[in-house]
Image: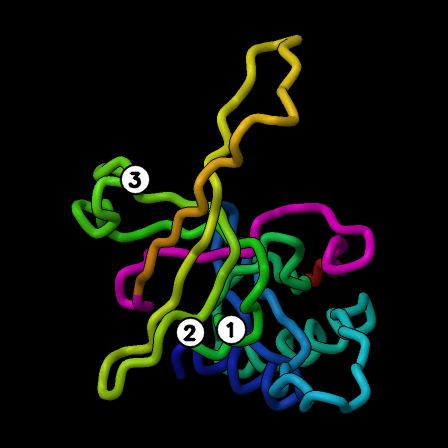
Amino acid sequence: MALQQIVEQTVTGLGYELVEITRSAGGLLRITIDLPWGAPPLAGSAQVAEQFVTVEDCEKVTRQLQFALEVDAVEYRRLEVSSPGIDRPLRGERDFVRFVGSEVDVTLKEPVGDAAMGQVNANRKKFRGTLEQGPVVDGAPAQWQVVWQDAPKGKPGQRISKHRAAAPVQVLGFVLDEVREVRLAPVVNFKGRSGAAEVAGG
C-alpha cells in the first residue's frame, strides 16, 4: 500500500484531516494533521469557537501510525506528527472555502503575464493578500481571488503623511490549477491560529 494511502486512512480513521506528508534528510517522516472542518454555521446560529490540534491528538495519531507503518514495512527513522501551525498549506477547494477572508501567500506556477492588465509586474509569481471567492461562472472551474494593496515604503525616519492617498486595491483572479502553493500567511495572531502542537515519535 502506498505511503499516502496508509497515512490518510490512519489519520482519517481516527477522526482527523491529513494536511501534508513530507520526508526529510535523515529518514524523518513528518505528518501534519488538523481537525476536520464543517461548513460555516448559518446566519443567526451560535458561533462555535475554533478548536486546534493538541499534543494529545498528535500522540494518539503517532501511536497508530507507528503500528500501521510497521505492518506495511514502511522505512523511516523518525516519525513526527504535528499541527499545521501558522503557515498551514491550503490543499484543494475545501481548504480554500474554509479559509476565505484569511491572509494568504499565493505562489503561481507561471508568471501572471498580461492577466493583471498592467497593474502587476508581468514576471511576478508571488502574492500576499486576502483570499476571496471569485465570480461564479456556470461550467467553469471555481474562481478565487487574492486582494492586496502595495503600500509605498517610506524611507527610514520618514514620517508618512496622513493625507497621502491610499494605495489602490489590487485583485488577481486564479483557479486551483494555476497555483503551485497557497499557504496561510504566517501572521502571528494571539487570538487565533498562532501555536502548533507537535510530538516526535520513534
The residue identified by callout 2 is: 92
Answer yes or no: is residue 198 visible: no
Identify the amino acid type marked 1. Asp
Identify the amino acid type marked 3. Val
The residue identified by callout 1 is: 95
Which picture quadrant has residue 62? bottom right
Q: Residues within 10 Å of mark 1 (few under 14, many from 20)?
A: few
Whether label 1 touches label 2, CB < 8 Å: yes
The residue identified by callout 3 is: 120
Residue drawn at (52%, 47%) of the image: 26
- In this orientation, which residue lies closer to the viewer: 43 or 177? 43
- Label total for image: 3
Q: Left or right: where does residue 182 sit relative to residue 174?
A: right
Name, please, the residue furthest toward the left. 114
- Magenta stretch bounds: 175-198
Between disc 3 and disc 2, the foreground one is: 3
Is 189 a magenta residue?
yes
Q: Residues within 10 Å of mark 3 (few under 14, many from 20)?
A: some
Answer yes or no: is residue 167 visible: yes
- In this orientation, which residue lies closer to the viewer: 144 or 30? 144
